[in-house]
Amino acid sequence: MRIDQLLWCLRYYKSRAQANQACRKGAVKINDRTVKPSSEAIPTDQIALRKDQIWYRFTLLDIPKTRMAAKLVDIYRMDTTEHFAHEHKEMQDRAWIKERDKGLGRPTKKDRRDLDDFRDETQKDTQKPTEEKN
């Protein structure tokens, strides 16, 4: 089976076009060799692919006939991805998350509406005395 079709069947990519593009970019390896999308994969191949800054590694146990449910994927592959790779990705994702303290940064929609109401009230108060003088 073609490697791009296999990666699609094993649900690593949502479409064959994405799997094809990953192969062309060099993000897929079979037995530590960069492969083309049309390369054939056979059982016992060691496959590695880079996706979302993680090198996923697995051993192909059998060739699936079609795309299958996510629960059945482990029948066809044995995952050998290092556990720390996922933990490292989670730490990177958490590093970007920052809590915004109340009153700092961009105002929320409610805060902005309250400010607009306040401005409207102050403008009405300042305009009334000038209108009475005329």
Image (cartoon, rainbow, N blue to C red):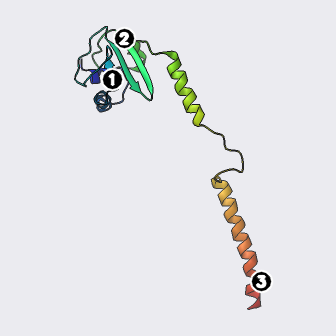
Q: Tag 3's secondary structure?
A: helix
Categorize mark 1 by other alpha carbons within 10 Å: few (<14), some (14-19), many (20+): many
Residue 76, can we see it?
A: no
Give the mark, 1 or 3, whose residue is nearer the N terminus: 1
Residue tagged 3 = 129
Mark 3 residue crowding within 10 angstroms, few (<14) / some (14–19) / many (20+): few
Looking at the picture, does residue 129 appear above or below residue 107? Answer: below
Pick whichever of labels 2 and 3 is earlier in the sequence. 2
Q: Is residue 56 left or right of residue 8?
A: right
* Dot in front, 1 or 3: 1
Please name the amino acid that badge 1 sits on. Answer: Val
Q: Nearer the viewer, residue 14 or 96?
A: 96
Q: Position of residue 115 (x, y in %)?
A: 69, 62
Say which quarter of the image contains residue 129: bottom right
- Under tag 1, what secondary structure? strand
Percent across and percent down for residue 94 are: 59, 32
Which residue is the site of mark 2? 59
Which residue matches tag 1? 28
Marks 2,1: beta carbons within 8 A: no
The spot of residue 46 in percent (x, y) is: 34, 12
**Which circle, 2 or 3, is nearer the viewer?**
2
